[in-house]
Amino acid sequence: MSTPRVEEKLFQNRYLVDAGRPHIRVAAHTAPSANLLAMTRLCPAGCYGLNDAGQVEVVPDGCFECGTCRVLCEPSGEIEWNYPRGGFGVLFKFG
Ligand code: SF4
């Protein structure tokens, strides 16, 4: 029996979306800072991306709540980060 890859383990997680109440928000900006830009490469769930205007956006559906973006961008006010409401967010069923 082979050892499952990390991607296969992460696929076992489930995420319950709290529609209309994202638990992470990016503050309005014209050009992203280096830290905010880095999140487009660092987020393990791929929640951060660039829009057509070159601004960083977040879609927190699938967020693992690892806290990387919170550590990097919340102290400077570039993002607002809260845990999802009870019953919503990531469900680590098999991870
Ligand atoms: S907490 Fe982790 S998984 Fe969630 S959006 Fe931030 S970097 Fe991505």
Image (cartoon, rainbow, N blue to C red):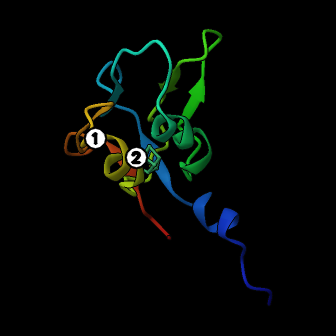
The residue carrying pointer 2 sits among few (fewer than 14), some (14 to 19) or many (20 or more) residues within 10 Å by Cα, namely many
The residue carrying pointer 1 sits among few (fewer than 14), some (14 to 19) or many (20 or more) residues within 10 Å by Cα, namely some
- Report the residue at 45% width, 45% height from top: 63
Q: CA distance from mark 1 to mark 2?
A: 7 Å
| Above or below 23: residue 91 | below
Q: Which residue is mark 2?
A: 69
Residue 94: x, y in percent?
A: 50, 70
**In the current view of this chain or complex, which residue is farthest to the right?**
2
Which of the 4 image quarters holds residue 48? top right
| Above or below 24: residue 46 | below
Residue 83: x, y in percent?
A: 24, 45
Please tell me the numbered disc located at residue 74: 1
Apparent side of residue 41 relative to residue 66 in the rendered image (left or right) = right
Apparent side of residue 63 relative to residue 10 in the rendered image (left or right) = left
Tell me whether circle 1 and circle 2 mark residues in contact (CB < 8 Å). yes
Amino acid type at mark 2: Cys
Apparent side of residue 20 relative to residue 42 in the rendered image (left or right) = left
Q: Within 8 Å: ligand 1 and the Cβ of disc 2?
A: yes
